[in-house]
Each structure stands twice: as C-alpha cells, then as structure tokens.
Amino acid sequence: MLLDKVQKKKLLTPTEAKYLKGRKFIEGRKPNYYFSLNLSQEIGEKANYSKNKALEKTYYLELIKKCIKDH
C-alpha cells in the first residue's frame, strides 16, 4: 500500500517515509519520493528512476564553468 502511494505521488506521513527509506525502497526528499535503484530494477522501471534521479553535482559545475568561459 505504501509503495502504491509513492507511485501515485501521494503524500507520505513521516513514519511511512522513514519505514520505506529504512528498507531502501524509496529515495528523494519530502514530498518528492521515488523508487530506489534496486526496486526500480526489480519492477522494470529503470527509465523512471533515471528521470527522477538528479544529475551529478560535477555535471552542473562543469556546465557553469563552460558558461562563464563562453560568456
């Protein structure tokens, strides 16, 4: 039932979120939780995981450096 709430983008209580995070079923910050990498691979939702997961910090730093250099 809790994973269904995550999938449907419904709000989780702090207790529910703590339970799912403790078992490494979800990632993200309140209220934007999404399935973890392992769970996404198990249920065949790898594309959604990649879409939800933010890019690495180094990518953004390099992008900023390039913009500063170019302009």
Image: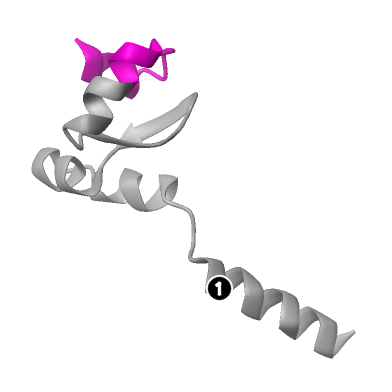
Q: Residue at the location (23% across, 21% down)?
A: 19
Q: Position of residue 65 (x, y in %)?
A: 73, 82
Taking the spot 26% from the left edge, 42% from the top edge, the residue there is: 36
Q: In which quarter of the view is residue 10 placed?
A: top left
Q: Give the percent coordinates (x, y) of residue 17.
A: 33, 21
Percent position of residue 3, x then y: 23, 20
The magenta segment is 1-17
Q: Is residue 65 above or below residue 50?
A: below
- Residue that label 1 marks: 59
Relative depth, front residue between 23 and 5: 23
Q: Circle 1 sits in a helix, a strand or a loop, which is it?
A: helix
Above-or-below relation of 60 to 66: above
Q: Nearer the viewer, residue 25 or 71?
A: 25
Residue for point 20% across, 43% down: 40
Q: Quadrant of residue 69?
A: bottom right
The quadrant in which the N terminus is found is top left
